[in-house]
Image (cartoon, rainbow, N blue to C red):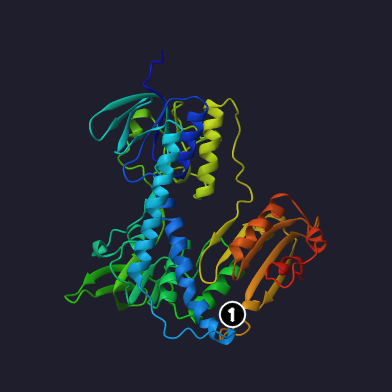
Amino acid sequence: MSDYEYDLFVIGAGSGGVRASRVAASHGAKVAVAEEHRIGGTCVIRGCVPKKLLVYASMFAEELDHAGPMGWDLGEKSFNWQRLRDHVNGDVDRLNGLYTNTLDNHGVEQILERATVTGPHSVKLASGREITAKYILVAVGAWPYMPDIPGVEHCISSNEVFHLEDLPKRVMVVGAGYIAMEFAGIFNALGSHVDVVNRTQTILRGYDEGITDRLLRLASARGIEFHMDSRLNGVEKMEDGTLCADIAGKEQRIDTDCILIATGRVPKTEGLGLESAGVAMGTKGEIEVDEHNRTSCESIYAVGDVTNRVQLTPVAIREGQNFADTVFGDKPGTVDYDCIPSAVFSQPPMGGVGLTEGEARDKFGSVKVYTSDFRPMKNIFAETQERGLYKMVCDADTDKVLGIHMIGPESPEILQAAAVAVKAGLTKKDFDATVAVHPSMAEELVLLK
């Protein structure tokens, strides 16, 4: 007989928590998972998946503009936000059901209420029930940061975007990270006037500057208005529903219909009770863990966006898998965080893997940079003069590819294959020796000069 009710109790049923739960159960553990919102977590319910569907929908605006010169007479165009919104939320319901079924099929008990830690081996549910477990895994993810400014209650976060009653005619996006740039592109393509308020001169910090500079120019040309070195000081809601935004740095007020705060996400650890078990946390509330996902309390682990590592869904999934295999499957291992590819589903999309040009110069000193600046073939008949840009950063001494960065149609799809090559340590000569797929945008990767 075990001294505990469960071998594993998981708090949070997002990508990392679900993977850890079902894999631990497949290894024979008795597992329960608590989720206070919906099974599936941020990515599935209010993040990557529904956002990508909005991206696809908004891309039709550009495709329809390109259709005329291609011989298509499509007549008058119209767009129905409610129809799109309801289809997207319907797919979220479908995925929520699939995740629920996955846990059911693996014998994982699902508890749809909030759970908090009360000790190294104990949790308490919102209903008052107390539960013991040999191990506790915290996988509650992160939550949008909302600034403490007057009128912030009139603003929305990325959580609420998917439930807007109507498509706003005017949208203000505060921030210039990947969430901000993606929604700015979505609303702009769907016909809204978009203002982006950013506290610095830089968008998408951490990505290659040559690529982000290109995106800034293209986004501006598409009609997105950027307010750099600015910040949102406060919001006033007028009688007609207009939101009047006080913008510091510009000494002006901007009227808009919707203000989306996208200035980052913070680990959702507040009120979780981790201090009762002596779990160490960082200055932003992130849980500090070692290479095996273990916290400062030996019976409590953490994976995903709640930790002090990389905040990406595929990373959380790998961490959940690694945790379960290590603790319950007798297959210890660690997650390799080197050369993780990432994409921004902006318009046009961009992405990168490995070191940026700046990072490579700081680390290696002497590097070679190969580029291709081209007009995508699909844009030949279009009025737009948008050009794609691919960059390859190599060690000047060894010819090893240190990073690949790109912007242009279908860049994330192309990047996935390129990331394998960078991860494998291939050289520029290996790319040069590969025959091009013609005519394609991807062939530019083996034709870089």
Furthest residue in direction top, as rendered: 1
Q: Position of residue 119 (x, y in %)?
A: 34, 26
State the SS at label 1. Answer: loop
Furthest residue in direction left, as rendered: 239
Foreground: 290 or 427? Answer: 427
Q: Which residue is mark 1?
A: 386
Is 151 left, or right, of 84 in this rendering?
A: left
Q: Position of residue 134 (x, y in %)?
A: 42, 23
Locate residue 57: give its quadrant. Answer: bottom left
State the residue at coordinates (45%, 35%): 105
State the residue at coordinates (63%, 74%): 388
Residue 304 vs 171, above or below: the answer is: above
Residue 206 vs 227, above or below: the answer is: above
Q: Position of residue 32 (x, y in %)?
A: 38, 31
Q: Position of residue 416 (x, y in %)?
A: 63, 57
Q: Quadrant of the C terminus?
A: bottom right
Q: Quadrant of the N terminus?
A: top left
Residue 356 seen in render: no
